[in-house]
Amino acid sequence: MSDALLDAVKNGIMSVDLGRQLRVGMPQSPNHPQFWHTLPRRHGDMVRADGGSAANDMITTGTHVGTHIDALAHVSQDGLLYGGADAGQSCLGGKYVEHGVHTIEPMIRRGVLLDAAGFLGQEVLDGGYEITVEDLQGCLAAQHVELREGDVVLIRSGWGRKFDEGTAYVGAESGVPGISEAGAQWLAEQRIHAAGADSIAFERLAPGGGHSALPAHRVFLVENGIYIIEALDLEELARQRTFEFTFVLVPLNIYGATGSPVRPLALVAA
Amino acid sequence: MSDALLDAVKNGIMSVDLGRQLRVGMPQSPNHPQFWHTLPRRHGDMVRADGGSAANDMITTGTHVGTHIDALAHVSQDGLLYGGADAGQSCLGGKYVEHGVHTIEPMIRRGVLLDAAGFLGQEVLDGGYEITVEDLQGCLAAQHVELREGDVVLIRSGWGRKFDEGTAYVGAESGVPGISEAGAQWLAEQRIHAAGADSIAFERLAPGGGHSALPAHRVFLVENGIYIIEALDLEELARQRTFEFTFVLVPLNIYGATGSPVRPLALVAA
Amino acid sequence: MSDALLDAVKNGIMSVDLGRQLRVGMPQSPNHPQFWHTLPRRHGDMVRADGGSAANDMITTGTHVGTHIDALAHVSQDGLLYGGADAGQSCLGGKYVEHGVHTIEPMIRRGVLLDAAGFLGQEVLDGGYEITVEDLQGCLAAQHVELREGDVVLIRSGWGRKFDEGTAYVGAESGVPGISEAGAQWLAEQRIHAAGADSIAFERLAPGGGHSALPAHRVFLVENGIYIIEALDLEELARQRTFEFTFVLVPLNIYGATGSPVRPLALVAA
Amino acid sequence: MSDALLDAVKNGIMSVDLGRQLRVGMPQSPNHPQFWHTLPRRHGDMVRADGGSAANDMITTGTHVGTHIDALAHVSQDGLLYGGADAGQSCLGGKYVEHGVHTIEPMIRRGVLLDAAGFLGQEVLDGGYEITVEDLQGCLAAQHVELREGDVVLIRSGWGRKFDEGTAYVGAESGVPGISEAGAQWLAEQRIHAAGADSIAFERLAPGGGHSALPAHRVFLVENGIYIIEALDLEELARQRTFEFTFVLVPLNIYGATGSPVRPLALVAA
């Protein structure tokens, strides 16, 4: 059997990991249950007669924690989800049967990195800086790539560099850079499939404003059915100047959930 | 930019989902913390002034639950992990820093399905049936595929058809079909990268025997550094007779854990 | 200062523990998140420079697990909680602000044991046996105690002896003995404060019927505001023939929850 | 039957709740898994044919969270627990079988409040202030109470007033007032049974020092087998000037855990 994909794999693929490591104590929004991992059983706790032993884990976590994807069921506006689904009735038996994360197809798609920080000549954009439509267009031109329908677009503000600093990454007081309503509107017009960023809430947060208003979430999740990916690690991709790649993202198939931790990959043929 | 992988993606890819949906109440081993999902916040619980609202999740789970991968740190023999690492000292601060699931590279590799049930002309192999080396070799010959170094090998016993039956899938009394020490030894000699099956413990369990002895786990995880994937859904792949494919598996990058829920994919060019 | 209570304490109190030990794997209803306990940090994981070290825990659990109390918010009938409170509106921001377990006052009250199994001359009443009003009255007479307004009444069916047998205690197929609608109605007329039993669902369950109908719950929680305590250990109290005592129960003060694990005590002056 | 205790109860008891309400977001040490509560099932999610419905809960939490008690297994010194038990061997199968919280007897004992803040004429003692032996002795004299063997001693620094302020209560930067090694030594010489305070770590924390050294924990838990109770609410008791009372504390009987959330009561005859 000859398979173009398998041939490409055989010839070698370089993979860039876009996910953050899940560690107890990593920065996350206080709105979501904290990630915690512990070992109920360690080697030696129970050893079988033949000398074998098994260790195991217990995880407790929100789904909007670490690098993660928002299902369309995550956000409603005026009581409605995407496509006009009633937000109350979409929840049956304590599960979002409509637009839950189980409805997101695994993604193997063209991915495009928009290195906004690089384009604007900064290491990290300022807290509260709004990445404008002009920034997005200028960045695309400078990078010599165009957007196509169905793409996954990853926007780098450089804010991901703060991930290891802890609460600074959350940015409650400083604000966080990112696109806002206008940028989301323009990207939606390009008919992209999903958008991601290297910050915790994807979009621009005003200094001191917290999550009090999230217009890009509304534009993407409620009005256009475009998925949002948060807390990506885009540093290596930017360093390599890999602006176009095969984007792979496989959400956990959690019935009725509003999101999932993910570990997306950017792949290029070697 | 021309990229063989991206070209293959552009020309179309068919994807088969090999992961089970994560649902409260699904069958799992009682040795591991039960999967549970709940919505702390539903739409309407807190509506912002602008009419927007967000729903979120809380998950509690073991990592050896649903479709999942075993890290090498999962099993020890006589106090040692793979490569002779001391099982006690590999655990620092409550994390398996050696051979934890964070050390598993995402897999984009050649995958091979060995449909043992199909080869043996049965819908579901009997509980406790041991898939022998002869079965594996005969199956490969009948399917006209060969194994190559670095492959991921998925063995179908048909037991996955019982997943929706609940405790029958666990098979405590009936036993569960699968390979055992001999099959694992032979597969290890082929230098495969990982092996998976459609049953809960991957390998053959004797009727009434439970998990009292797991020789294939020892051969793979401890002696050969070969990963094990459990509770796969191999029904669609077998139905399509797709015996060779690009296998994609991206474990969650949980620092120091012994396993991770996963949602593997089998991809073929359209 | 002279204090009658403190004097009684000084003179000696005998205490009988009515709570079950919380252990991973104990029997519980599958409707509720499973109790799990694990040690994230053990001694030696992180030792301070001065040689000190601390170990800690992580618990995940439902609240209707082990010996526990039902808050009035646990059950609704036709959309209403006790006192006619709207069940939907009583839940604000994902918390039962009305009738949640945080509204239960700690109990230090007269307690009465009704040893129905002893009265009926059986070790354990049959699965599905309904303890009738006549049984309750006959038991009181035989024990030479009367009920008073505000009492906590504990009804022993002997079923608690099955707790260590695991799933037999849940009784899905066998049914479970206990009072039903008539007994609850009569007890409510005695104006008791709370009622408990040594079974998992307090009231009689028909063989094979599961929790499909729980009329005593409705009578107590919805119609009369009487709390229900489940999975008590009443064996020692019955053995001692201590039919009257000071009952102490202090629920965890969990804001907005529908129940709490508890460890009630029966106290008598020495 | 006449029972001095029951008579005291019949004549009326006033109860002061010394426990903090368990709420998502309350201040707690980042060393312990965060308290989280959510409702998997709300009324209306699943309504039975007869119009009845049940709501339930899921809790995830550390045990050293909210008002809680430390078991002796919580702290070791130079590899040893209280009584010279080996800290490593005391943990069997992932449970502290020695000195776990399941070994703490429910307490119904004489309790004494030492209102150190009141004695020192301050609303809240300064962060980092060490309550000295002289303070303890002076406070007892001023309050006209003496300590007796077996007492539970509650020390009020006033820091509990900060509980509702959130992170200020944790006091990482400010330090926290409390007794230290000398005070613990003196209290141990009085042969008390347990000691509590209104702060998160019971003992004095130096400004900026965090939990880097906890000598009073060592003196109490490791050297003298005296339990420690943290994050008490002592405001009402101090307001009433109730310095002597019946102290009731019933830990959850969690097999092998190092602590338990509790809701202690102070009782006085009416």
Image: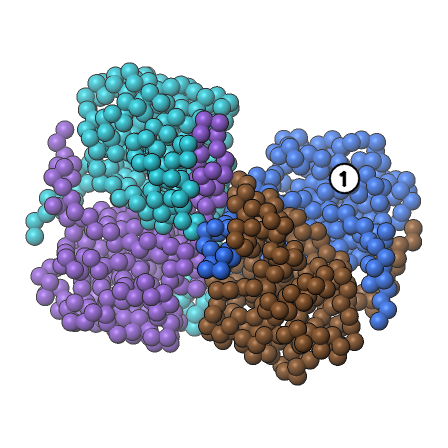
Chain colours: A cyan, B purple, C brown, D blue
Can you see residue C23? no
Q: How many numbered tags mark residues here?
A: 1
Along the horizontal axis of the image, is A239 left or right of C190? left
Viewer-nearest residue: B81 or C7: C7
- Three-letter amino acid code at disc 1? Glu
The residue at 21%/51% (across/down) is B16
Q: Quadrant of residue A74?
A: top left
Task: Find numbered disc 1 in the image and state the secondary structure of the residue it sits on.
Answer: helix
The residue at 44%/36% (across/down) is B54
Along the horizontal axis of the image, is B62 left or right of A248? right
Viewer-nearest residue: D244 or A99: A99
The residue at 40%/24% (across/down) is A204
Q: Can you identify the residue that label 1 sits on?
A: D235
Along the horizontal axis of the image, is C116 left or right of A196? right
Viewer-nearest residue: A92 or C124: A92
The residue at 53%/70% (across/down) is C205
Would you place residue A249 above or below residue A208 in this image?
A: below
Give coordinates of residue C254: x percent, y percent: 61, 48
Give coordinates of residue C40: x percent, y percent: 52, 51
Q: Quadrant of residue C147?
A: bottom right
Q: Quadrant of residue A220?
A: top left
Give coordinates of residue A260: x percent, y percent: 37, 43
